[in-house]
Image: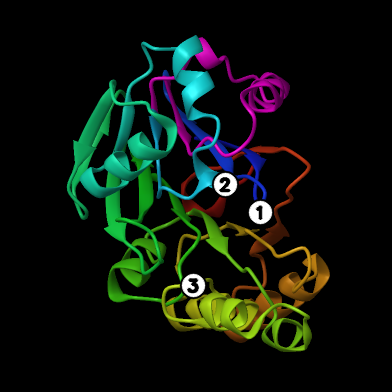
Amino acid sequence: MRLSVFASGSKGNSLAVQGGSTTLVVDLGLSCRELERRMAFCGVEPGSIDAVLFTHDHSDHCCALEKFHSRHPHVPLFATDGTAGAIAMRTKVEDGWTAFETGGEFEIGDIAVETFSVPHDAADPVGYLFSRGDESLFVATDFGTVTEPVRQAFGRACCAVLESNHDSELLARSERPPALKQRIAGRSGHLSNDDAAELLRSVRPRRLGMLFLAHLSGECNEPRLAVRTVRAAAEAAGMRDLRIEPLSQDCTMCCEFAAGGEKT
């Protein structure tokens, strides 16, 4: 399978997963022009996308939808009922939706899709586990508490995109309003570096070969700090060969992954 991350951060999020002849995109959180430029860089043709799936309704995950849908109206849109309704109100895109229940499983082309609930202050947010044969990709950002469904999905991944939003000390020392700090650090906010590290240390996914740290705060985190924190957990868990990389708001990333931690 192939993973392409077009952007990850508070200003916009979008990625694609490709398996067999199927291309799925998760979220459309950049301007349509910029998103299509980054797709082209990674060899993703917008007109050939088999579906767009949404994690939740916040603007940094869906702001390009109205323009994208007008340009590519044939591309199906997948979301939970709550997320689809909230995005439709935000973007005025009311057609093209396929709704699924949280926790539901279905197939789109060559890729099997499993969904799981995540705690976040949105209408009905979800994470995804995409699979084709023995290969699987975990995608979960924008959540403040690790739940059992998150742990179970993460434990089955051979590649993962996992939130590592902030360093707790940097957040506490920042000039952000107290209410915002409380929201970010709350149960329905965002995972810290320590939270991501603890998830890795406690679950120790046996097939995980690649871990990408997502949605890093530009003000309350540093890529090297996030990687160092999670790397220490990997070593403590005996996962010294695990590839750990931070994702960026401004740079695209493309890679291929396979079962058993093999990388190309």
Q: Is residue 70 left or right of residue 107?
A: right
Q: Residue at x 33, y 22 (%)?
A: 76
- Element assignment for label 2: helix
Q: Is residue 85 left or right of residue 93?
A: left
- Element assignment for label 3: loop
Badge 2 density bin: few <14, some 14–19, many ≥20, Cα 10 Å: many
Observer able to see residue 134: no
Closer to the camera in the image, 150 or 111 = 150
- Location of mark 1 (residue): 9
Task: Tell me how far mark 2 sits from mark 3, CA to CA.
Answer: 15 Å
Q: Earlier in the sequence, mark 2 or mark 3?
A: 2
- Location of mark 3 (residue): 189
Disc 2 and disc 3 in contact, CB within 8 angstroms: no
The three-letter amino acid code for the residue at tag 3 is Gly
- Considering only vertical position in the picture, is 86 above or below 108? below
Query: What segment is highlighted magenta in the picture?
Result: 22-51
Disc 3 and disc 1 in contact, CB within 8 angstroms: no
- Element assignment for label 1: loop
- Location of mark 2 (residue): 60
